[in-house]
Amino acid sequence: MSDSLIALEHPTELQHHFADMEQQKSTSTFGMWLFLGTEIMFFGGMFAAYLIYRRWYYNEFALGSRSINIWLGTINTMVLICSSLTVALGVRAAQMGKRKLLVTLLLITMVFGVAFLGIKGVEWYQKYEEHHVPGSSFNASDLVSVGQKYGVHINQAHSQIYFSLYFALTGLHALHMVVGLGIFTVLTYFAWKGKYTPEYHTPIEIGGLYWHFVDIVWIYLFPLLYLIDRKPFH
Amino acid sequence: MATAVVTTERENYINSEYGIRSWLLTTDHKRIALLYLLSITFFFFIGGFFALLIRLELLTPAGDLVQADTYNKLFTMHGQIMVFFFLIPSIPAVLGNFLVPMMIGAKDLAFPRINLLSWYLYIFGGCMMLHCIVTGGVDTGWTFYTPFSTAFTNTKVIEAGLSIFIVGFSSILTGLNFVVSIHRMRAPGLTWSRLPLFLWSIYATSIIFLLGTPVLAITLLLLIFERAFHLGIFDPTRGGDPLLFQHLFWFYSHPAVYIMILPAMGVVSEIIPCFSRKRVFGYSFVAMSSIAIAVFGFLVWAHHMFVAGISLYSALFFSILSYLVAVPSAVKVFNWTATMYKGSISFSTPMLYALGFIGLFTIGGLTGLFLAALGFDVHVTDTYFVIAHFHYIMVGGAVMGYLGGLHFWWPKISGRMYPEAWGRLAAAIVFIGFNLTFFPQFILGYMGMPRRYWQYPPEFQVLNVFSTAGSTILAVGYLLPMIYMLWSLRYGKIAGDNPWGAAGLEWKTASPPPTFNFDETPEVTWEAYNYDEIPMPEEVSLER
Amino acid sequence: MGLTPNIERLRGSKNMFETFPLWPVQASTIAGQLDLLYVFLLLLSLVTCTAIFTTITVFAIKYRRRHGREAEQIHGSIILEIAWSVIPLGIFLVIFAWGAIIYFHERTPPRDSTEIYTVAKQWMWKFQHPEGQREINELHVPVGRDVKLILTSQDVIHSFYVPAFRIKQDVLPGRYVTAWFRATKPGTYHLFCAEYCGTMHSGMLGQIVVMDPSDYQTWLATSRTFGSLAAAGQSQFEQLGCPTCHRFETQGRGPTLNGVYGNPVTLEDGRTVIADENYIRESVLNPGAKIVSGFKNIMPVFQGLVDEEQMNELVAYVKSLSVPPAGSAGNPTLIPPGTQPQHPKE
């Protein structure tokens, strides 16, 4: 390797094409922020579709929203908020060089993440049993009768649009959680190896940024999907 | 030049390592640029081959060369390959990858491994597209309009959509790398106001990559779900709205046009000052117009939908915004022209391409004004007038810019000069062939010939024959550079570090550059395009 | 193949130069207006191109590289920059206004137009005249009369394009859109589908036959009819059992339809909508979407039970119950068929 000579004079974590650690860190952080910007646009396209159809098919959206288990959603919201806290504490631990604390906090975060996915799975399974998964077996006749009770007309095709967006949005979010868990597995491994020091812990910060972002997306999804209109009609 | 012999013997990015692994696992931006060069050239000729078949079919009014379904697949895949696998990556991924780090005086892009990843994503998506083509292809048009694409066609929409989805991430990562590098990795003294205009345009392009491509990605994902599971989101029989798909699609795909043209404008902004030996006229206006185009470009998407069934008032809104985005483009053309004023102009191949660019882009831009006029658009949208217009921009503009840039930086990339006489001949052939192919299509469009027609009424034949004849000339024009550039790799004259006497950091290092670009990090103390301080080598100026 | 006549028309003359027009026929009132704008734009482009290309050529010759001549470094000029931003912008705004005026004209059908219902499907055009004549891939219209097309598609998106009239309108499935023209010159003109719609997109051709009024009357008289469109609609109405609830002399379980078309309707949730073609369409196909105030949601859904042509007859019938016919088919907007934007309930 031709850059081994240069590397010797530098901290080992410094990649050859950066002048100093400062530059490397600010570059990586900036890159993650930009990436999160693209993520906003990614979810944004779907939010746009959501807003339009919610305006058109309000009754179907409201009743669809009520059919989702709000308790599971609330618990999941709490779980994610707690995981954000442990991530933030983890970054702090990395800054102070507390290796064991860092590893513990990362592991707790991952437990929260797995718990979130598990609860999400239960919620999806409920929807599956209720035949609310869009596709050939979709059936929202239960919502139609609920609608009749309140005197609102429910078009099952429009209910399907609600559930399509529900599954697409929560599914994409869950996919991001899975990616986050993958990132955190790697981070935990290196943290355990003692790679991160008060001088160098950029990956922890960047991974944390990503985790917080995925949490924030959920903070938007929760009211949009679960809390459209929980009051009885009229 | 005296230093030339020494230069080639030095270790450079090409001869520093050998073997297939050293290329496929490289993180060197210059090697990745060459990987891209090979791959996009491959796709360019595939897309071009489809275009030739299309033109041959249209030689006669009856559909006699291929079946209707085959024809529909040909124009679909011509569009998809040319847009997503050639035009969008062309200048950014090849010239941008090669030049951005050198122009900012850095050793590499900010994230070299992500850069390699984006090439692999491109190749993965590309292989998927090729697989899709050989196993049956897709016939929706590159625009994938619903409900045809989701509920009616029985071709491979999902695979084509996925391949474009994947290639989209390659674009996002490339754009991310460029923006971060330009922000954080500039050499000392290289302030924003000293940046070469190529970087400004790459920067503007990258913003579109970052903000637009994710929307395309999510749109294609919804399309794929819709087709696979019949969700109803874009299906009018289930309460969905096909126009929503068009809105989401054009939200990306209109700015995508600026992804193609902005980098070419950047190339032209480098070439014209160099061969006029002048600082570019109105530097800050040219720079800011790139940013303005990128920003306004996001606000005009629905001008593709004036007859699609949008409301009268939104049509008015998008029409007037489309005129606003035309202003910065006009400003650029005027500034390039003014740059030549009182210059000292020589006509090497890159300059010929740059002048050709101005001519074709002007025509493409002016006809864009036609199309933005609401009432006029009603008559010519979805006809050959639109086809001619966007080919003037995307082929006349973007491809001329790409070829001009490739010739301009070829000595830097390869260390060799291409044969100048052949270069000029090819530029002339491309220019003539292009105009013969696409100018008749303006008339065809106004006459009313709709696009995507496999057969057509006989009164349109004469103009179609001109167009087909032109396309064969154009094909020769595109094959020539490939041949003589390959030839030059072995037999070309040794180029020297700065054969054009060009300004810019990339010319201050060896040709081909060493792996880390510069022996020591340069410090910039001069303004961009300080041509009063750099002499042009005699051999360029006397080569007439 | 059933498309042979279309293809045959394409295999015309032996010598391609026999017909080699460079300007499309002008056969509608819009065509002249549009061509005028086109000529203006062409001249503008010609002037601009000449100016730019001449300047470049002059510079290229005058300032070509010569021994003993150095380039003069000029950094720019704010005045020039402002001038060549503001002047083009002014010209652009003129073009915008001109184009917008024509567009406005194109999108606003005159009030007393003859209404022809058009159904597009892969790969043909079907027309229903108010007098009851039906045509496929051929539409007969008289010179000098405003003709409004009420278009819908049975499958994918198509586009109704008549170059000689300079009109084009995408035809969407699941809703009505409108286009109109007034033909000025007898003759036979191309009707193209301009939005890609599948295999035989290029075979989805038709012709518009523009006739002198007297010839047109002859044509009307000689062509087979099935009774007027509204009459056909009435028999549909009766066959489907609609009069059980929608009564005329007394109030039934459904609202009476007299004078509904073109007028505001108050819905049970307090909103008001204008009963246009798209509203009638939705009320038949998906009646629960908008319940008229004071009525219950008891009407069966007719989605899938009436095809597009029957639907058109029903619409024509309901419209015939409102005299005089008023208003236009709703402006197609980014809202679903016949809907007005909804607001969250209290």
Image (tube, rainbow, N blue to C red):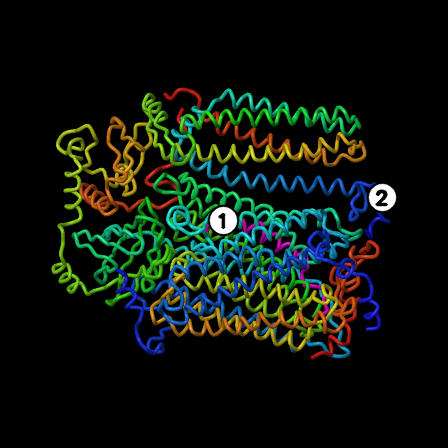
Please say whether residue B292 is one of the residues in the magenta stretch: yes
The residue under label 1 is B161
Q: Tags 1 and 2 in contact by the CB under 8 Å rule?
A: no
User: Label 1, label 2: how many angstroms apart (C-alpha)?
Assistant: 46 Å
The residue under label 2 is A10
Is most of the magenta stretch helix, strand or loop?
Answer: helix
> Residue B206 in the image: x percent, y percent?
63, 50
* Residue at image coords 41%, 38%: B231
Crowding at label 2, few (<14), some or many (≥20) Cα neighbours within 10 Å?
Answer: some
Q: Nearer the viewer, residue B285 or B427?
A: B427
Q: Are marks 1 and 2 on the same chain?
A: no
Say what secondary structure mark 2 lies in.
loop
Which quadrant of the rendered structure holds the C terminus of chain A? top left
Mark 1 belongs to chain: B
* Residue at image coords 71%, 54%: B21
Mark 2 belongs to chain: A
Q: Nearer the viewer, residue C169 or A204?
A: A204
User: Left or right: B513 with respect to B347?
Assistant: right
Crowding at label 1, few (<14), some or many (≥20) Cα neighbours within 10 Å?
Answer: many
Q: Amino acid at mark 1?
A: Gly
Q: Nearer the viewer, residue C118 or B68?
A: B68
Name the quadrant containing residue A199. Answer: top right
Name the quadrant containing residue A147. Answer: top left
User: Left or right: B73 with respect to A40?
Assistant: left
Say what secondary structure mark 1 lies in.
helix
Q: Please report the bounds of the magenta region as a residue range.
A: B276-302
